[in-house]
Image: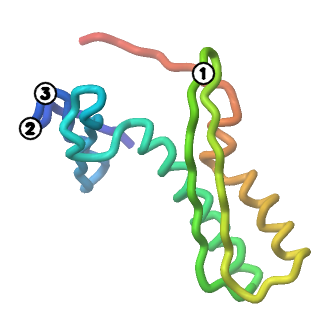
Amino acid sequence: MAVVVHGGLTPLAKRVEIRSHQLTVDEDASVGGADSGPSPHDLLDAALASCTALTLSLYAQRKGWPIDNIHVEVTHAESPGLYELTRQIRIDGSLDDEQRARLLAVAEKCPIHKALSGQFKIASQLS
């Protein structure tokens, strides 16, 4: 899958194409953007939150566990050499303590969590 980024309508905004989907990415006014879309950091946070919710939903579905709603909130903080993500997970449904503990363990195994917990290698080419 390729992600394509093009210039946008404002100096910092960019149009992102992912398969047949398009969205605008921008920065907020505090750094010179127009806040016409989420920032790249917002997208990273959203990737972890959405992957967590999808992973938990699929797992609970396979187990036949009664889940009404999953709410995942991710925030981040940056300091030199550290990008720290905090994930708050709320699961609404009639689950016992053992099921909740299992779902927390499953959250640790969502594909984005695993990717962000591993090492990265980025190869860049200028054309």
Residue beneath the point at 56% across and 39% down: 76
Q: Residues under labels 1 and 3: Cα distance?
A: 27 Å
The amino acid beneath tag 3 is: Pro
Crowdedness near tag 1: few (<14), some (14–19) or many (≥20) residues, C-alpha within 10 Å = few
Q: Which image quadrant is residue 104 in? A: bottom right
The image quadrant where one finds the N terminus is top left
Q: Is 98 on the left-hand or right-hand side of 49?
A: right
Q: Secondary structure at mark 3?
A: loop
Residue furthest out toward the left: 9
Residue 90 x/y as whole percent: 66, 69
Q: Residues under labels 2 and 1: Cα distance?
A: 31 Å
Residue furthest out toward the right: 98
Residue beneath the point at 60% across and 73% down: 70
Residue beneath the point at 60% across and 15% down: 80
Crowdedness near tag 3: few (<14), some (14–19) or many (≥20) residues, C-alpha within 10 Å = few
Residue where numbered disc 2 is placed: 9
- The earlier-in-sequence mark between 2 and 1 is 2
The amino acid beneath tag 1 is: Ser
Residue where numbered disc 1 is placed: 79
Q: Residues under labels 3 and 2: Cα distance?
A: 7 Å
Foreground mark, 2 or 1, reads 1
The amino acid beneath tag 2 is: Leu
Q: Secondary structure at mark 2?
A: loop
Residue where numbered disc 3 is placed: 11
Q: Which image quadrant is residue 95 in? A: bottom right
Q: Secondary structure at mark 1?
A: strand
